Image (tube, rainbow, N blue to C red):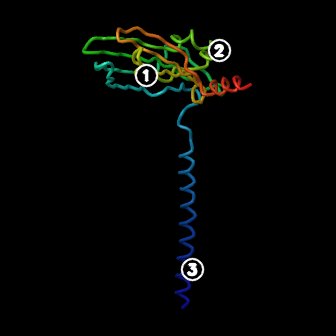
Amino acid sequence: MKSLLYFLACMALECLIACSSQKKNQTDDIRVLTEDSISANSMQHMPVSDTKIIINYKGRQYRSAVLREPDEKLSIVVNDQGTQFVDNHISLKLTCEGKVILDKVFTKDNFSALVDGDFLDNAILESLVYDKTTSQGIQYTASICYPQTDLYIPLSITVTPNGKLSMAKEELIEDLYNDSDSIKQ
């Protein structure tokens, strides 16, 4: 009977030691998972995006290719926390039946006539996507934004079938509500 009690006491002690050492390993794992893998001094880059689609417009088939790439030759944007962001350039190539309709590279400076200079200084060119076709041509929407925030300005780019380009600032939802409030008063 004494040997059975001695054996059970040894087993309990062994389990206690095993459990306590296991907790130390779990703590180490948690510490590794919570470490930030990005250096505070490194510049943030958006991933490269390459989108190709076919657009049917007025009985013809157009091929659209939009390529967004970070460009370290462009100005660096620094947010309030001191994080640096590399701006992007976006290439738009539109072809029809093998003929190039438009082949243009956009930077945020292409929109300086539509966007306030102070906003541009603190923003990056985030995206350019196909939106829709209209009677004027093929419409894309571009977005200039403060990095990693919801602050952005949408812009409309229309390409005519002969390759002419027009740009306009899109209405923000907040602006539409403010306009309707002023009409009611």
**Distance from label 2 to label 3 (Cα)?**
74 Å
Residue at 28% in and 20% down: 61
Residue furthest right in the image: 185
Residue furthest left in the image: 97
| Mark 3: amino acid | Ala
Residue at 46% in and 21% down: 70
Q: Secondary structure at mark 2?
A: helix
Q: Return the disc, 1 or 2, that comes first in the chain's sequence.
A: 1
**Distance from label 1 to label 2 (Cα)?**
23 Å
Image spot of residue 68 (x, y percent): 43, 22
Numbered label attached to residue 118: 2
The residue identified by callout 3 is 9
The quadrant in which the N terminus is found is bottom right
Residue at 54% in and 71% down: 15
The quadrant in which the C terminus is found is top right
Q: Return the disc, 2 or 3, that comes first in the chain's sequence.
A: 3
Numbered label attached to residue 68: 1
